[in-house]
Amino acid sequence: QVQLVESGGGSVQAGESLRLSCVVSRFRPAAMGWFRGQGREEVATIDFAGSTTYSNSVKGRFTVSQDYAKTSVFLQMDSLKPEDTSTYYCAARGAGDSWFGPNTHWGQGTQVTVSS
């Protein structure tokens, strides 16, 4: 069974940093990403080739990366703001799949709280 296990959430003050990690098991993703909130707002994604995308709200503050085996994805979050407070979800999908399709796998979510 495919598993995505996130870690690294927590509570910080505005301006501080957090690093989220996600380990993907029993699946070789074509792309991995981070989403937040109930509506699963796309935050940052990275594909097998290392190409990245960022939402405008986090561009310049967050950095997405993956390990050499491409089975772990990380989100370095700097200069955090109170509006970044949310549950962050890791996702992994296959080639040609959409992020919200039936073949995309999701983690359980990790809470990030930023206080002013």
Image (cartoon, rainbow, N blue to C red):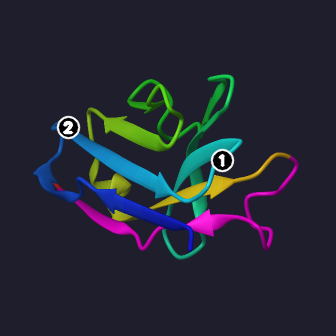
Residue 20 in the figure: left or right of residue 93: left
Mark 2 and mark 1 lie on one chain; the one further toward the N terminus is 2
Look at label 1 and name its amino acid.
Pro
Q: Between 73 and 19, which is closer to the camera in this rendering?
A: 73
Secondary structure, mark 2, is loop
Determine the residue positioned at 49% across, 67% down.
3
Determine the residue positioned at 60% across, 72% down.
39
Residue 59 in the figure: left or right of residue 103: left
Circle 1 Cα neighbour tier, 10 Å, few/some/many (<14 / 14–19 / ≥20)? many
The residue pinned by badge 2 equals: 17
Residue 33 location in percent, x, y?
A: 57, 47
Q: Residue 29 carries which label?
A: 1
Residue 63 location in percent, x, y?
A: 43, 29
In the rendered image, residue 111 lying in the magenta stretch gets the answer: yes
Q: Give the range drawn in magenta.
A: 96-114
Look at label 2 and name its amino acid.
Ser
Circle 2 Cα neighbour tier, 10 Å, few/some/many (<14 / 14–19 / ≥20)? some
Secondary structure, mark 1, is loop
